Image (cartoon, helix red, strand yellow):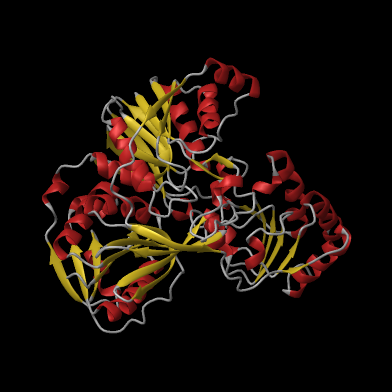
Amino acid sequence: MANDILVLADHLGGQLSDTTLELVGKARELAGATGGQVMVALLGAPDLAGRIAGADTVLSVDHPALVDYTPEAWEKALLAIVTERQPRLVLIANTTIGMDLGGGLSAAWGAPLVAYIVGLQADGGGIVATAQVYGGKLLAEVAITGDRGVCTVVAGSFPAAAGGGSPTVETVSPPAGLDDLKTSFLTMVEPEGGDVDITAAELLVSVGRGIGSQDNLEEVQELADALGAPLSASRPVTDAGWLPKTRQVGKSGLKVKPKVYLTFGISGAPEHLEGMRDAELIIACNTDAAAPIFDVAHYGTTIDLFDLVPALTDKAG
Amino acid sequence: MRIVVPVKQTPDLVEELDLNDDATDVDREFLKFVLSEWDDQALEEALLVKEASGGEVIVVGFGDPDVELSLSTALAKGADRAVNLTGLGEGWIDSHTRAAVLAQWLSGQEVDLVLAGVQAVDDLDGQLPPLLAATLDWPHVGVVIGVEGKDNTIQVSQEFGGGKASRLEVKLPAVVGVQAARQPPRYASITRIRQVQQAGGIEEVTVTKPDADAGITVRRLFEPEKTGHAEMLTGSPEDVADRILDLIRSKGLLK
């Protein structure tokens, strides 16, 4: 119905993401304001239905093409559900899956979309979202006009649903289009083993774009060795191939929670902060005093890393 | 294979982002605009695909500030054609509008593949690639870190968190949102870019802004409320190094 809030269950490899339950929690609050119910679309994983506490109804669609995620199959199944149920809002996590499906659903269902949402509330009859723009340097307060909308939401923006109750599980027939697809799943490539596990380290020395070049990495490596810590990195460093992907911290890398996280030349884009903000003690070195990393760090300095790193290595050795 | 790479200019985030008078947009007058970093990745991946399996790369701009420089740079790097779609005005151009305009232009071309940046720092109403794909009714894959052309299909690697990636095969024509190219974007020398600029190879096409908008209203932009700020350590590098080592020791590390 036009007052319902629909959440897409975000899952991969049999694991339901934490964000799904955060979205269900927010959907419960919004449904209280709109007078609708909380529905969850669960695609290709009927076994996960029992884990979705806090929803009123789980709409489970199962089909061989939905088991291993492809954007095309999932978008068709999700579009069929929203076309039939016409919810007020669709909430999708801003993961790989969400980045695929949000835009497609917006265009195919003819609904406005707000991306990178960190805040969401009912405002009179309308919906108002707060979203990150310009690399998290600014927030935008956005009103969704009309009677429907799609929201892609950043992980960790809302507390998880309180749980309790058991949702009604409704099995929904898959749409016909799933038997004739242009996209096929071949295989899932797991990360290469053998490298250090940065999620297990108590101390991480982490480098970002500010180190400038691969040659400069050596100096920071010496410091890391002196401290007995592995090197980790933000996305630009692994994209450039200066460190392996197994060292990448962030939304698209690994989430770490060391006792101490010491950064050099990391500005603190939302992508990175999502992976390290729960570290016990964050110490950041960046020459830009306005860098967002200083808003999450406990201690910071704007001394040039090329002056600070040798001093640290000397004293730690 | 004929590949289109749409490119957009976004504010250089190194600079201070001032707001306009009613705080609904950044103040564009004094901002420096640069090529969106993901579009640079998409261009690189397109050039790699062309080098591996032949074809043609066409970069398409939307009349954004200083886009001519990005288009010329793309030509200098090895793109075959550059087209600038103008007439969309001076303010923020949302992704829905860009998708509609590009879909319209593509309908008059023979194109196999669109490689676009998976996101941009100002795509508040959603990422361009899936919007474009749904408009064209082409298949789409986003967050891609590698594309290989194979006759009338492509194989792509789609990245998930924690280093996982799935391999997908997609029938062409298709739209792909590129997260990162297989290698860092190449550079073009200033001399080469100047040569290209003098040759004047950018095709300009005037387009009409579509009626449909994104359906969202930006009420205001504002700086995030600081929930906290780091205690800043000052002094000589040696002093600060001592403080940092003390802090690390306070957590029971580095006995």
Q: Depth check: give the residue in front, A209 or A32.
A: A32
Position in image of residue A187 (x %, y %): 33, 44
Q: Is residue B253 left or right of residue A48?
A: right
Determine which quarter of the picture holds residue B254. Answer: bottom right
Q: Depth check: give the residue in front, B25 or B112.
A: B25
Which quadrant would the C terminus of chain A be assigned to in this image? bottom right
Q: Depth check: give the residue in front, A105 or A242.
A: A105
| Residue A73 visible | yes
Residue that protrudes farthest toward the bottom in the picture: A164
| Residue B167 visible | no
Which quadrant would the N terminus of chain A be assigned to in this image? bottom left
Residue under the image location 86 percent in, 58 percent down: B237
Q: Is residue B140 left or right of residue A95?
A: left
Residue under the image location 30 percent in, 36 percent down: B103
Residue under the image location 69 percent in, 70 percent down: A298
Q: Is residue B219 left or right of residue B246?
A: left
Position in image of residue B1 (x %, y %): 34, 23
